[in-house]
Image: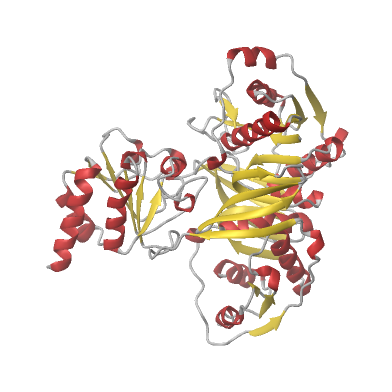
Amino acid sequence: MSVGKELAGHLHFPWHILVMGKGISAVAEEAARYGASSVLSADHELLEHPVAQVSASVVAQATTAVEATFIVAPVTPWTKDFLPRVAARLGAGMVSDVVGYEIEGNTVVFQRTMYAGAVNAAVMITTAVKIICARPTAFPKAKPEERPSAIVPLSIEIDPASIGTTFLSYEDRPSERPDLTEAAIVVAGGRGTKGREGFQLLEELADLLGGAVGASRAAVDLGWVPADLQIGQTGKIVAPSLYFAVGISGAIQHVAGMKDSKVIVAINKDPEAPIFQVATYGLVADLFAAIPTFVEAVKQTKEA
Amino acid sequence: MKVLVACKRVPDPSAKIKVKQDGSSIEAEGLKFVISALDEVAIEEGLRMKERRGGEVILFSVGNVQAEEQLRMGLAMGADRGILVVYEGFPDSDLVARAIAAIFREEQPDLVLMGKVSPDTEAGQVGQLAAEYLGLPQATFASKIELDADGSKAVVTREVEGGHERVEVQLPAVITCDFRLNTPRYASVPMIMKARAKPITKAPLDGLGVEAIAKVKLRNLLPSPQRKAGVRVESVKDLLRCLKEEAKVI
């Protein structure tokens, strides 16, 4: 929302918020506090567990309804799935993982990273409708305003016969911990944790600090932690105030997902591990000794 | 089962990437190139389907003529033939998707498989764009694909926020693969020898009826600023003191 609002401000455009789902009136009310020209509310049975064709169709219909020229969305597993379909449907150019932009005359130049964070690319969209998927860690959050927006119900048409995809089930993994991409502290483990038991140590530390648990791709591929905890080029991008990389060697594919963290702590047995090249504080130690000691020390300072 | 699988030429993920002085592209000189790791997963999945069901695995790539090297490597894994859409420029995702749509219309496969994202340009759009252009269902981020008995449907387990989702897609469909789907095989020496004789068709864009226009244009590349190393601490006690007193993050 902050990207859409700011972009609209620079270009002197109205901006609208699209809320889509099933039974979403509370979310629409909430969205109406952000100063948009209107909040479009698409409430539909098929949006309870939306498949890509349905989500894409709704966004395309909303775009037409308000004659939008920019579509701005945050990078999430959901938007990554369906937003390119919107682009193909509307003949629009789409830029994934936008981390910044500049307005040069009538043109908006978008910045994004490539090659596991080694390269910054400046790109332009040549089509009338432009789609931007913005990386949430790269922009501030929108703030609520005084003046509420009007909520406009959006009537949508979906032909169920044209979808070809049926939602079957969703296997939830309930967690008490904060969301990985929103947590102020992330404790991440890699191959060096050697398995579930190693991760239990990290979970204890995360819970003590009110943080989230993350992992390198190696730990996910080995089945030690669920796939949605993966941080890195092919997983999530995080930028907490404090990031612990524990038993993670620090391949650039992992670093791409956490290098914008404010403080990075690396704990690794191998003094040559590349993770130390990006760490604010590096500790060469065996995590199985260091983490329990650290946990005890934190507990003591909390009690003191 | 006729499966069309992506086989993208990308720099070796362990290689150090340098940007050309003029910012027009990366410095390819001296770089080692490989098949995109997630495309390898897609190729493996296609081969396993063929081993169970029979049929054909066709690889495609959109890029410069050197991409033939990676197609050859994919054929050495066991694929039957390759299609190289020759394009010397910097294709945006949309151009690649339109090329795939053109190949699809010609080949009429039962399934299109590819990695969920490639490690070079990292857009993650091609599969979904191609599916929409072809009016096909899609399943992205697949960690399991179960084909039904007559090959008319597939149940796909997808890695989504908070867990796993299962969807059923009517075939033909486009499925993009995640790392947990399988572990790709290595090509054996006899297979590498055998792959030399397998056909690779070169198809220019205009021959496919695909217009060479870009919806997203690259203006320039810059090396990104790298984070600097901080300090080594001697003990857990030191670490905690630094985090509390210096960084003030605990």
Considering every residue shown, the one lying at the far bottom of the view is A147
Q: Quadrant of residue A30?
A: bottom right
- What x and y, as percent, mark residue A38? 66, 80
- Is B218 placed left or right of A279 in the picture? right
Q: As displayed, is residue A164 above or below residue B91?
A: below
The quadrant of the image that shows the N terminus of chain A is bottom right
Considering every residue shown, the one lying at the far left of the view is A304
Q: Quadrant of residue B100?
A: top right
Tell me if I can see residue B182 in this picture.
Answer: yes
Q: Which of B17/B80 is in front?
A: B80
Q: As displayed, is residue A207 above or below residue B205?
A: below
- Is A259 placed left or right of A45 in the picture? left
Tell me if I can see residue A101 in this picture.
Answer: no
- What x and y, as percent, mark residue B209? 87, 39
Residue at left 50%, top 63%?
Answer: A139
The quadrant of the image that shows the C terminus of chain A is bottom left
Q: As displayed, is residue B10 above or below residue B101?
A: above
- What x and y, as percent, mark residue A58? 73, 68
Residue at left 67%, top 78%?
Answer: A41
